[in-house]
Image: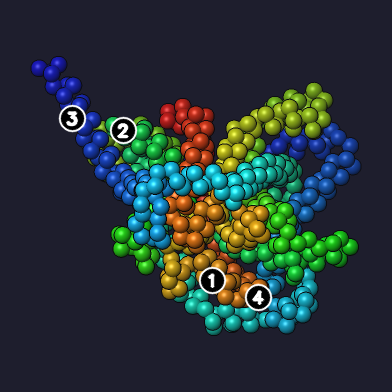
Amino acid sequence: MTRADPLARPSVRPSSRTAAPRRPRRASRLGLAARILAAVVVAAVVLFPLYWMLVVALSSRSDLLGGDLRLVPRTLTLENFDRVLGSFPVWTWFGNSTAIAITTAVLTVGVNMLAGYAFAHLRFRGSTALFLVALATLTLPVQVIMVALFRLVTDLGLYGSYWAVILPTAASAFGLFLARQFLLGIPKELIEAARMDGAGHLRVFRSVVLPLSKPLLAVLFFMSLLASWNDFAWPLIALKENRLFTLPIGLLYLQSENGPDYGTTMAFALLDVVPMVVLFLVFQRYFVQGFARSGIR
Amino acid sequence: MTAVTAPRRRRSRGGRETAVAYGLIAPNLLLLGLFVLLPLAWAVSISFQRTDGFGGGVFTGLDNYARLLADPVFWRSTGNTLLFTLITTPLSMGLGLGAALLLNSVLPARAVFRSILILPMAVSGVATALIGLLVFDENSGVLNELLRFVGLPAVQWQSGGAAAFLSIVLVTLWWRTGFNMLIYLAGLQGLSPELQEAAMLDGTSWWQRLRLVTVPLLGPSSFFLLVINVIYSFQVFDLVFVMTGGGPQDATSVLVTYAYQNGFVVRDQGYAAAIGMVLLVFALVFTAVRWRTSRTKDLTG
């Protein structure tokens, strides 16, 4: 079970206790300065490409073509956004991404909570074998099955709809793995006690397991939302019609149409990147738990 | 009487539990069976066929596999996949460890630095690749401007094979180091301070403590990251596809992009499925390694 995000808690390291009084003051100050410098440099390297994307997206075409870009731009303009919104169905694609990501996330949460509970707390024949099979599919790149999956999706009549992306994506076993890991943390005694009181498994699931699993629900939801929003390889195959594109596919399409016009490409890329970056920062502790636990052990 | 009913009741309860359990896992099994296992079996079958576009095929035995063996681009892609894995795995782990040590030390605004370092994880692969192109563009990219500014020659990040490969490696490091940092940070915070303190009292240097105490104790984190990084590296698709498309002259082609190229551009689906089978073998090997090392912990957990 999860309590507060363990990584967010500042840990008291031995150095914090030993550094100050025992060592010469100057050395520890120098060490601190060096560490701050290193952290700032690393942060700058990570942030610069994102900052540069923002600068290019907000720069006028003449500045971009004239090679007159500066680290801190003198004039900012929204003309790249106007151009990209005027010539591509960006809001349709934004809507597609949103609809597909939310549906996939809801489906993933529902399906994996149920299965995760069964694998964590019920004894049944074949559970080990089934779980291992599900686990084995985790390392399978979609390129192994894409040829057949494409035919299957076509045969099922899903091609040309959102479901061609949603259903195969929701089939990923990563959520199952995460759910089982978390649910194993609910004490067996708690479930046994409820069972003794005569509650059926569905009842136990609803009134004991679910209320204790809010952090898990959030982790599962955000992780699959992020994965689905950013997914590329399978949507590239499954979405051939312009009106169904998600943002990453639209982004690629725009780039192939526009060539190296970085101003509009970056303006569009921002629309793809900003929603997830904001969610990521706001709900960071759920993402951190998800990343730290997904596939662990 | 009681001796007869007791076991039967237990059995029937076990049977009911199994029924309930299968009801609970049914949606999951259905999705997994229909959209992963069935296509997997189908892909195996397609890999033995000569196909015509997306239509039906004719079974031709091992023909596709024989072609693979004689295909220089296939070997190039396999070599590139391995090379990419060999380069990015230790580098992203090393950088991740360095960043984690830094963020685990006394440092102001640690939470802010941590947030910044993991930010690239929220960025989609396509956007990451396009930002990579923006920075690495050999004509207008900001990196070449910088190189020229300090008096170095500009690098042909797109038309030079090795440079194109390097640009993908560098963008990958930007994208992935945060994840490695996160896992190492969790590992570091799980270590007991006593050992470090004991080592410190013995008069060891910082470097000795790192090498002889910290890194060995981080073994589980390192192993987990090794597996995850290898799995990730041999599936690298988005960055290669968008940044170089496998070019120039297949210098950055990897197995996943070559499979896509054959399956959906050339539309030689039987051949693409055969490349997929090579990927499957890799995936199964990684899965086996993962099981062998974690089975007991995971199943009894």
Q: Is residue B141 left or right of residue A101?
A: right
Within the image, what quadrant is residue B198 found in? Answer: top right
Q: Is residue A285 visible from the viewing direction of this image?
A: no
Q: Say what amino acid the circle numbered 4 marks.
A: Asp
Q: Chain of mark 1?
A: A
Left or right, B148 with respect to A157, comes to right
Which of labels 3 and 2 is toward the front? 2
**Residue B208: percent from left, percent from top:** 78, 29
Q: Chain of mark 3?
A: B
Res A253 label: 1
Q: Earlier in the sequence, mark 4 or mark 2?
A: 2
Residue A261 tag number: 4
Q: Amino acid at mark 2?
A: Gly
Amino acid residing under circle 3: Ser
Residue shown at 65%/44% (left/top)? Answer: B83
Cα distance between the residues tagged 3 and 2: 17 Å
Disc 4: CA contacts within 10 A as few (<14), some (14-19) or many (>=20): some
Q: CA distance from mark 1 to mark 3?
A: 59 Å
Q: Quarter of the image holding residue A187?
A: top left
Q: Disc 3 marks which residue? A: B12
User: In the rendering, at what x and y percent does residue B261 appear?
Assistant: 52, 58
Measured in 3D between alpha carbons, the distance from the residue under mark 1 to the one under mark 2, in whole angstroms, is: 46 Å
Determine if marks 4 and 1 fall on one subunit. yes
Q: Secondary structure at mark 4?
A: loop
| Mark 2 lies on residue | A126
Give the mark count: 4
